[in-house]
Amino acid sequence: MALPLDRLTPPLSPLAMPAQDLFGPHRPLLQKRAVCARVLGARVVLTAITIAATVYACREMHGAASPGDVAPLEWLLIAVFAIAFAWIAFSAANALTGLLLPHRPRPTVEGSAAGKTALVMPVYNEDPRTTFSALAAIVRDLPPSARGDFEVFILSDTTDPETWVAEEDGLAVLRRLAGDTPVWYRRRPSNIHRKAGNVADFVRRWGGRYDHMIVLDADSLMTGDCLLALRTAMAEDPQAGIIQTAPLLIGAATPFARAQEFANTIAGPTVARGVAAWQGEDGNYWGHNAIIRMEAFAAAAGLPQLSGSPPFGGTILSHDFVEAALIRRAGYTVTLRTDIEGSYEGAPSDLFGVIKRDRRWAQGNLQHARIFGASGLAGASRLHFAIGILAYVMSPVWLLLILIGVALSIQATLVRPAYFPDTFALFPNWPVFDVARMVALLGFAAFVLLLPKMIAVADALSSPRVRAAAGGRRRILVGALTELLISTLVAPIMMMAQSGIVLSILSGRAVGWTPQMRECGSIPLPTALRFHAVATGAGLGLALIALLHSPTLAAWMSPTLVALILAAPISKAAGSARLGSFLKARRLLATPQENCPPSVAREAERFTEKFRDRPRNAIVALLAMPTLYAAHRNALDTPCRRRGAVDAATATATVKLAEAQSLEEYADWLAPAERLRVLSEPHLLDGLTVFQNSHSQNPLPLAGSHARSA
């Protein structure tokens, strides 16, 4: 039976969630299980391969310069090369570890009943048609007998007035589609601590109602079988704190998105298998598509405010890594289950959205440098922090490696070599460089860099199921080469963008909170040129220097230089829906989930037609729907205002209402901030009700005529 619209939330069921002391004495809530032999073996293999490959590469780099005296700049080159090579060696070692010692889920143990599970979706100015239709499809994919064990809870931090009204309007439709699964909705009036604060506030208010929560992102999709498998796995192991799935990307519409989806589908399982093998029960959490034990999350994962101001102080942005580390510190397990399938998320559509998203993620990951030394953390948790930091710091490292190479080339052409030393010698010190050894080293580096992709492609080709679903051997091979081409063109652009982001953060510039771009759109070329001006300028400058001093160096650097110089058109083409349709029509970069979309994805797409678009004006739309208006009005809390503290938006909205002669005129006069204030304050809505009733033949219900929600 559908819930009445004026009942937005269930009765309160509080659960204490204290902020954790990161650096004080810590005592685990549970006794940690010993690390199993297979996980220890995987860690030994990972470490040994990474160190061996890095030592060999550094020895060869030193040997290439050792026939002559190694200059200070060459020593710097060797040092930076060691860092860069260790990064790609770790990636290759991870793939080999998963191949040699694949993770095996711990055998199930006696557990408690499955319990009640909340499907929690935090949203922030997202398109309600997309998010609500996805939730409807997820619930409808559950067996009817299991739907009563789940509840949907939409946690809105939306600040756009039209999106807010669309969310409330779509709630009744979603409840009808969900049937026996209750659907709750709560919008916070203040977005304190962003997504992490939103989820924490939910736990503190209603956490006692649920045994677990499955956290969804706005573009998440999960099958009913996946939800039941996660819930069963959680119930079978009372010590499980977080069980993370490895989502497959879905719904790619642009060349960039299609390349990401193909790489995620073909190489993702190889990477995930390796990560699961060495991390064992000391895993990580990616913020969505995972099940979390509510008791563990409340007791162990309350996030403190970091001292100081942003970007390194204040609210913890990349909260998911920290929550996983704290839950593991408490003795609960955090695992990655690669064997649980049916987990999906949307693919990023273009470089513009990815770079804007990376600005926020990079700040959050760099914040982890302050948490790295927290007391009681597992060694693997600290490694997860280090990997997250290096994921962005490596871009400046690669850029520095290129600049050192250019500097060496300039030095070779501008600085006269000292052929004869100051001391007596029979022969001059001719500048010697072992070119053949360097070429061999570059070949080895390319092999190590591409090894994870080669393992993944070989794995896909050897699987009859994947091979058939992806369109056969030829399409997998052509897709792998196409993805390699796109990633080669995109990598230098991302290197420049992330280098700028890291330098910006290190200089003290903090980032705001903007909605993530999920839908592809055509970016005008002038906009693309401005967005990538730094990359284009850097490419032109490096090309000019290389051509003037060493055409050979320019030839070696040509892939990077071409990508930087053409950054704007490459970025625009990568985000083109038309070019994406062209590739799709020719089945280039096709994936199994594209060739045969899962039923939950097809249902989500079908359900979008049942939800209305966002209204043009929230005020007009709300007043046109008396039932929705009453539910909206009765769900508002009366704000506490200090005498003499006047909000500017409230004041201007009040004045405009006094001067307006019609609702349409008033609505057109209001700026977005003023519309949001009118929707948020009961006394403004009450004044609007009086105004509407005096100017309309269809009076609205007066405040208080409907019971408030619990």
Image (tube, helix red, strand yellow):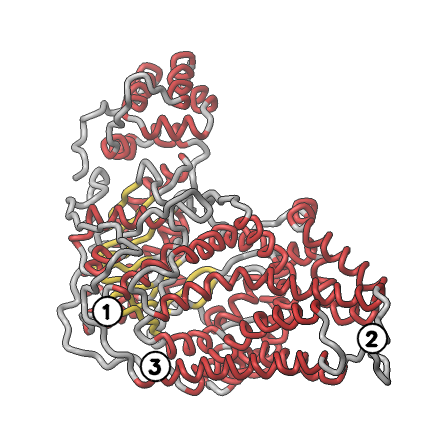
Which label was assigned to residue 345? none
What residue is shown at x 32% (from left), y 16% (from top)? 644
Instruction: Identify the residue at the far top of this view.
Output: 659
Q: Is residue 680 left or right of residue 525?
A: left
- Local crowd at mark 3 within 10 Å, few (<14), some, or many (≥20)? many
Quadrant in which the C terminus appears: top left
Q: Could you say where residue 397 lies in the image, as x and y percent from the top left? A: 60, 63
Nearest the eye: 169 or 303: 303
Q: Residue at x 75, y 84 (%)?
A: 436
- Spatial CA distance of label 2 from label 1 is 68 Å
Q: Marks 2 and 3: which is nearer the front?
A: 2
**43, above or below 157, in the image:** below
Mark 3, residue position: 39
In terms of depth relative to the viewer, which is nearer, 282 or 414? 414
Q: Given the image, on which type of amino acid does mark 2 rest? A: Pro
Q: Check the image and report above or below for 133 versus 156.
A: below
Please state which of the two labelled residues, at mark 2 or mark 1, is closer to the viewer.
2
Give the distance between the C-alpha atoms of the residues marked 2 and 3, in whole angstroms: 56 Å
- Residue that numbered label 2 is attached to: 421
- Mark 2, Cα crowd under 10 Å, few <14 / some 14-19 / many 20+, is few
Residue on which the image places disc 1: 240
Q: Earlier in the sequence, mark 1 or mark 3?
A: 3
Q: Is residue 310 above or below residue 520?
A: above
Chain-order first, disc 2 or disc 1 = 1
Dot 1: element: strand
